[in-house]
Amino acid sequence: MAKVKEWEWEIDPRYHWFKWELGAILRYKDLLFRLVRRDLLANYQQTVLGPFWILVQPVLTTLLYWIIFGRIVKVSTNGVPPLPFYLSGIICWNFFSDVLSGTMYTFITNAAIFSKVWFPRLLVPLSGILAHSLRLAIQLGLFILLYGYFYLRGQLPAPRAGWFMLPFVFLLTGLFGLGVGLILSVATAKYRDLDYSLQFILRLWMFASPVFYPAAIVPAGLVLWFSLNPLTPLIEAFRALCFGPGVIPAVYNWIAAGTVLMVLFVGIALFKRHETSLTDIV
């Protein structure tokens, strides 16, 4: 008896909200790595410094924050040396904003590819988060060197076991940026004018997050609302693991983790729901 060949894919007029076919990503892992390579090369082509921008950008931003907020405005860093304090916030925020910005334009920047060949569309935003994770690893190496310098000067405590929790903090940060970016990718593909308002909101979001100031200076009446921003517990957790205990209650870390998972779930559901129809709109 001849063996019946199984269908590799099937066209169905019905949409299943929870049929995400995430297993297809593993079958296309080679394409995923090629997309990561493409993202890394595309970001630094036709630049003088090339990949050195990975280090130059956070260094220049840290120095700018140190001059403006440390020397001129004199914002407290809660007893932490200003340079490692500002760099810690910049690393967290850059990772979140880079993942979000790279994901929210998925349909617009890849419309030509999506209209010609089929592959799991989630590979594109996943390649973005992997590429930015490599950037994050390099910037963390810079942070460790700076931390070691101030530790040798006796201005920072010795690294503790809590440092092993840092990958979990950055995992939640990246997944939060991915989830928000997936939701916005659907919105920006339909309504192009959202791009201008979203860039403005993203800048305001940075000021609402403890990037260049500690959560300790936030008035007591605003701590609750301030902590509901998932980036607040995540950035403060990074600093608490490195510099010492923070002021954000531990319960907000669990709230932030739950919020991240919920946003990611909604983002993937919306992305999968509209991944085929938006190709014609764009």
Image (cartoon, rainbow, N blue to C red):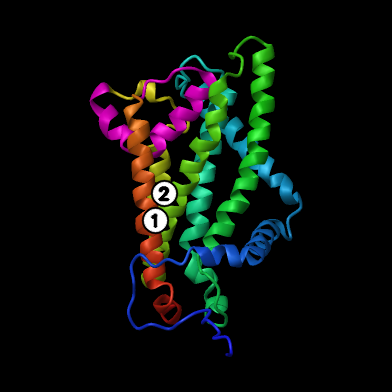
- Viewer-side residue, 36 vs 97: 36
For the C terminus, the quadrant is: bottom left
Residue 202 disc label: 2
Q: Name which residue type carries label 2.
A: Leu
Write the residue at 41% across / 70% down.
189
Residue 198 disc label: 1
In the rendered image, residue 268 lying in the magenta stretch gets the answer no
Figure check: 113 above or below 216: below
Q: Name which residue type carries label 1.
A: Leu
Figure check: 14 above or below 251: below
Kindly indicate whether the residue at mark 2 contacts the one at mark 1 (C-beta within 8 angstroms): yes
Residue 74 picture location, percent across and down = 47, 20
- Viewer-side residue, 119 vs 89: 119
Residue 80 picture location, percent across and down = 53, 17
Callout 2 secondary element? helix
Residue 192 in view here: no
Badge 2 crowding class, 10 Å Cα cut-off, few under 14, some 14 to 19, many 20 or more, is: some
Q: Give the range drawn in magenta.
A: 220-248
**Main SS of residues in magenta:** helix
Residue lying at the far bottom of the rendered structure: 1
